[in-house]
Image (tube, helix red, strand yellow):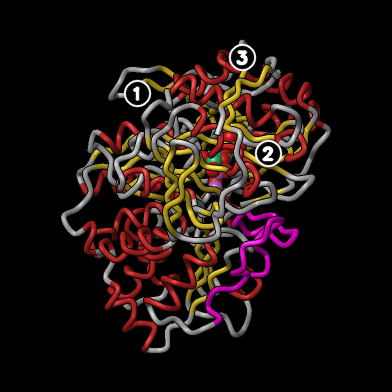
Amino acid sequence: MTIHTVATSPIAGQKPGTSGLRKKTPVFMGRHYLENFVQSIFDVVGAEGKTFVLGGDGRYFNDRAAQVILRMAAANGAARVIVGQGAILSTPAASHLIRLNKTDGGIIMSASHNPGGPDEDFGVKFNMANGGPAPEAVTEAMFERTKVLTGYRMLDAQDIDLGRVGRVQLGAMVVDVVDPVADYAALMETLFDFGAIRAMFQGGFRMRMDSMCAVTGPYAVEILERRLGAAAGTVVNKEPLPDFGGMHPDPNPTWAKGLMDEMMGPDAPDFGAASDGDGDRNMVVGRGIYVSPSDSLAVLAANAHLAPGYAKGLAGVARSMPTSAAVDRVAEALGIASFETPTGWKFFGNLLDAGRATLCGEESFGTGSDHVREKDGLWAVLLWLNILAVRKQSVAEILAEHWARFGRNYYSRHDFEAVASDRADAMMAALRGALAGLKGQVFEGMTVSGADDFAYTDPVDGSVSEKQGVRVMFSDGSRFVLRLSGTGTEGATLRLYLERYAAGPAGLNLDPQEALAPVIRAAHGIARIAGFTGRETPDVVT
Ligand code: VG1
Ligand code: CO
């Protein structure tokens, strides 16, 4: 088989965002687009003699992109690629395979919670040898490489059969096609008390797991129904589809409405959960009660020791800046460190590697631990199940006790989607310009105690990330944060994060939107959201 160097020229805009490069699928399928980016990855990390993991969430173009990436890996001199059967791997499973096999990294094909299909989204992301998303310095180097690329290397070969588990040769490179679920499921068994959870299901505990026609279906069926004995049919939307059945595979109350309705209905099961396109996000819902991701992180941190994998306690916890401070209160009570990082899982990598944080989370339905280097949807579901099995209480009871002990951080995120980019940029620029004068001013009866543009210095390697979101803090502990999404593919998505603390015992059971109403009004007033974007009401409320 021959190796060609195909002449190409730089394609503008191949800049990875919060989590890899995401574009509309037709853009990715355009001439040289995927190839240029993949060559830039290999040019930066080096491929000669190396071993990589490859897999994706099964969305439209996943299978064909996998064949191209394999031929390019072979042409660039890689020794071996471990690929999920059918080119499928959930993001946390890919992270685990990278670590388990001590490989040099991996390529994940996904646009995560973004819809999939011929006219929807596709994405490619590189993870390092630690199993985590490439840090900013590396993705920046890849972007710089895309700007000067003149050729990419391609092996002249036919597609290989990714449908069958086993070893195949591709030129001089070995391809190991593996079961996407087996190693991941085995890892989960080392962390959680499967016996206790199985006994809970045997006792009549009912659950609904909504895989949203995305990648976790086969994982959830194997783990929940086969290994833990949950009733057949517990997992719904379990067939991964290239277009996710036309759904938006984002587990939040807006897009997982079917699950929400079921959980708030008269015949609700004990526990509900959903996960996203690539399986790294989770939403958990109790009977009649929604658990905000920030609260979920706090409850998991306070109870993780009940699961065997965390019995010795946590080294520390970390959350992204826009995530509520609920977990900080738990850390304080436990006497452990808490860290506040920019948005995106890549910022947790160093803390996890250095053993300074055990549990991490983001308000965007992401929770995880040092068992892999990605957030992990099913892991969070299993930790909840383990806690429920030990405490033998309902989700509502556990939340009520949590708030009574730590107080409640009322929290919500309002997303304004597909806003014209120039307007969103102008709004953020005006807000940044106004920050210096905000301190001491009073809005909705609340005094601004501080306002800044969040910057982060990594405590492990000293790298600095600036302009990570504007935050306005009030003297009563309330705050709001505004930032633009780095994962969207259409215009700008404006994210407004809102938080207000109630110490209790009174006022712990309000509707979050009501509790947050003054903060919402203050944010709209200060940032002039409607004035700049023409938008009064959000498209998604979490
Ligand atoms: C969003 C979330 C962020 C998350 C990222 C990737 O980023 O806010 O917390 O890490 O998606 O999640 P942004 O830049 O759009 O706000 V996933 O499940 O799409 O890999
Ligand atoms: Co995801």
View extreme (right): residue: 534
Q: Is residue 253 magenta?
A: yes
State the residue position of label 3.
149
SS of the residue at dot 1? loop
Does 80 appear above or below 491?
below
The residue depicted at 76 percent of the width and 32 percent of the height is 30
Q: Comparing marks 2 and 1, which lies closer to the viewer?
A: 1
Position of residue 148 measured from the top left corner of the image (x, y, whole percent): 61, 10
View extreme (bottom): residue: 203
State the residue position of label 2.
521
- Decide if residue 450 is in sight here: yes
Amino acid type, residue under disc 2 in the picture: Arg
The residue depicted at 29 percent of the width and 41 percent of the height is 102
Cα–Cα span, label 2 and label 1: 34 Å
Cα–Cα span, label 3 and label 2: 48 Å
SS of the residue at dot 2? helix
View extreme (top): residue: 148
Is 372 in front, or is 165?
165
Q: Tell which circle, 3 or 1, labels the residue nearer the N-terminal end.
A: 3
Magenta segment boundaries in residue numbering: 233-259
State the residue position of label 1.
458
Is 364 in front, or is 152?
152
Q: Which secondary structure class fits the magenta region best? A: loop
The residue depicted at 54 percent of the width and 66 percent of the height is 217
Does 130 appear above or below 246?
above
The residue depicted at 53 percent of the width and 20 percent of the height is 142
Cα–Cα span, label 3 and label 1: 31 Å
Q: Comparing marks 3 and 1, which lies closer to the viewer?
A: 3
Amino acid type, residue under disc 3 in the picture: Leu
Does 77 appear above or below 331?
above
